[in-house]
Image (spheres, helix red, strand yellow):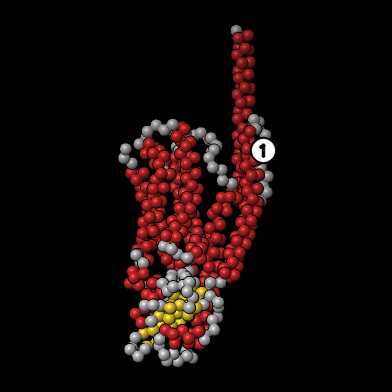
């Protein structure tokens, strides 16, 4: 059966919003990721360079991820909203709808935004991490990327949660069009404090993690520059008159290493038989390609990969045949103590905020519970002739609710009194009429 125009419109609206949100994910990631991961200069915006080192350049990768996310979440949304679309088709065709169906739709309208919220975070994060693992990215890059991704995905999921919740509230209102039942909802029960935490924490999480990662990135960046200057000072004071492997090795051996993990690199002409003083390492294709493309632009700084915390300072030498040799030192800029410090800060601050929000929300929920319990008590009373006012415990919106209820209670009591007075008047009128009738019969 074909969908009604209203259902088609809703589907288009949801599909457009999902596509827009996924596009925002991709754009935000493409802007923030190079900063967080300290991408090598010039490499992110040179598509020709990217095509030399990867099957797909970054623009193509982002397009592929966008398509995957849009398709996956469109399928998930259609599955979740299947019964709601079915209900709307019946509603707009004026077909009979059973009370059990209405209850099921109301339950779905409450539950689906939360289900979608959690599923999008899990699926998007899993897809991102899986792609990094497939590409063979180092663990520290995956760790930082995972932290960044959870921030962006949480924020975007929250926006989609609000969007779905708003549209499904409109559907819920339609279920009350032809019925006046007031059955209490029996699906997921999300406490006010939990709901508040779910909607606030993504903003806190994003701000804390992004600031921490940027701080770590800038610190390691400066560490890389200072290490480069250290080796640059030594290398520039050497003549390197004999350009052969053994002579260069002997010369570089005399330069003290700044760290035990550092090692020197010798790249002969044609980039064959490359030598490193650390036999456990090898020069990557990315390193050599970056050397060809950007050596002069970066003043000798060369990098192992996107986001890799391993880089080198190289110089170019020409032998008697006019061929180029490259020599230099490769080093790591990873600072695990600083990384652990930032992770500790993230956990501590986030925990502190969660506790604060929980206490604050519980305090706010207390006002709601007080009003709710009072109303429930009133609803169970059988005697409506006595006024039952709610105490006004605060001068805010909750106080306004209590005040408004008290005004309704006052008006209700007034109307009940009027009804009672009218009933007594009618009884008295009937009594007098009956007396007059008896007197007339007696006279006759």
Question: SS of the residue at dot 1?
Answer: loop
Q: In this view, does 263 lie above or below 3?
A: below
Q: Is residue 47 above or below residue 440?
A: below
| Residue located at (39% from left, 75% from top) | 288
| Residue located at (64% from left, 44% from top) | 369
Residue 429 in which image quadrant: top right
Residue 137 in which image quadrant: bottom left
Q: Quadrant of the N terminus?
A: top left
Q: How many marks?
A: 1
The residue at which mark 1 appears reads as 388
| Residue 181 image offset from top left, x and y in percent | 51, 33
| Residue 173 image offset from top left, x and y in percent | 46, 41
User: In the figure, is residue 285 to the left or right of 345?
Assistant: left
| Residue located at (62% from left, 42% from top) | 372
In this view of the protein, can residue 47 be seen by the observer?
A: no
Q: Nearer the viewer, residue 161 or 216?
A: 216
Q: Residues within 10 Å of mark 1 (few under 14, many from 20)?
A: some
| Residue located at (37% from left, 39% from top) | 89
| Residue 352 image offset from top left, x and y in percent | 63, 59
In this view of the protein, can residue 243 be seen by the observer?
A: yes
Q: Which of 333 and 252 is in front in this view?
A: 252
| Residue 356 image offset from top left, x and y in percent | 64, 57
Q: Is residue 52 above or below residue 159?
A: below
User: In the figure, is residue 272 to the left or right of 363?
Assistant: left
User: In the figure, is residue 408 to the left or right of 265?
Assistant: right
Outermost front residue:
246
Q: Which of 215 and 341 is in front in this view?
A: 341
Outermost left residue:
2
Q: In which quarter of the image is the C terminus?
A: top right
Q: Which of 388 and 105 is in front in this view?
A: 105
């Amino acid at each position: 059966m074909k969908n009604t125009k209203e259902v088609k419109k809703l589907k288009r609206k949801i599909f457009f919003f999902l596509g827009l949100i996924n596009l925002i994910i991709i754009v935000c990631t493409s802007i923030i990721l190079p900063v967080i991961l300290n991408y090598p200069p010039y490499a992110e915006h040179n598509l020709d360079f990217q095509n030399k080192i990867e099957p797909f350049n970054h623009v193509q990768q982002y397009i592929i991820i966008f398509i995957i996310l849009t398709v996956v979440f469109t399928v998930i949304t259609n599955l979740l909203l299947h019964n709601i679309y079915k209900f709307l088709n019946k509603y707009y065709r004026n077909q009979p709808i059973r009370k059990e169906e209405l209850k099921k739709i109301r339950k779905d309208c409450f539950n689906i935004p939360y289900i979608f919220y959690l599923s999008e975070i899990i699926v998007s994060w899993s897809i991102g991490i899986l792609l990094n693992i497939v590409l063979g990215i180092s663990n520290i890059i995956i760790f930082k990327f995972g932290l960044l991704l959870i921030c962006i995905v949480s924020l975007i999921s929250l926006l989609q949660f609000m969007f779905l919740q708003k549209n499904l509230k409109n559907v819920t209102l339609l279920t009350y069009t032809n019925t006046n039942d007031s059955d209490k909802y029996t699906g997921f029960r999300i406490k006010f404090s939990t709901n508040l935490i779910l909607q606030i924490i993504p903003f806190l999480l994003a701000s804390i993690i992004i600031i921490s990662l940027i701080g770590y990135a800038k610190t390691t960046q400066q560490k890389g520059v200072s290490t480069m200057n250290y080796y640059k000072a030594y290398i520039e004071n050497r003549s390197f008159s004999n350009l052969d492997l053994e002579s260069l090795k002997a010369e570089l051996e005399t330069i003290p290493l700044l760290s035990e993990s550092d090692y020197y690199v010798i790249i002969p002409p044609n980039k064959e038989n490359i030598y490193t003083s650390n036999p456990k390492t090898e020069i990557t294709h990315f390193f050599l390609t970056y050397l060809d493309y950007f050596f002069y632009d970066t003043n000798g700084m060369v990098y192992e990969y996107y986001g890799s915390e391993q880089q080198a300072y190289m110089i170019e030498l020409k032998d008697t045949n006019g061929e180029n040799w490259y020599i230099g030192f490769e080093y790591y800029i990873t600072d695990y103590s600083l990384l652990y410090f930032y992770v500790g800060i993230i956990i501590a601050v986030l925990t502190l905020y969660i506790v604060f929000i929980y206490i604050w929300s519980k305090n706010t929920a207390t006002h709601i519970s007080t009003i709710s319990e009072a109303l429930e008590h009133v609803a169970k009373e059988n005697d409506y002739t006595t006024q039952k006012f709610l105490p006004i415990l605060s001068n805010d919106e909750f106080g306004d609710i209590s005040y408004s209820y008290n005004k309704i209670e006052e008006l209700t009591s007034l109307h009940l009194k009027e009804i009672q007075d009218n009933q007594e008047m009618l009884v008295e009128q009937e009594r007098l009429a009956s007396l007059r009738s008896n007197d007339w019969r007696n006279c006759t």
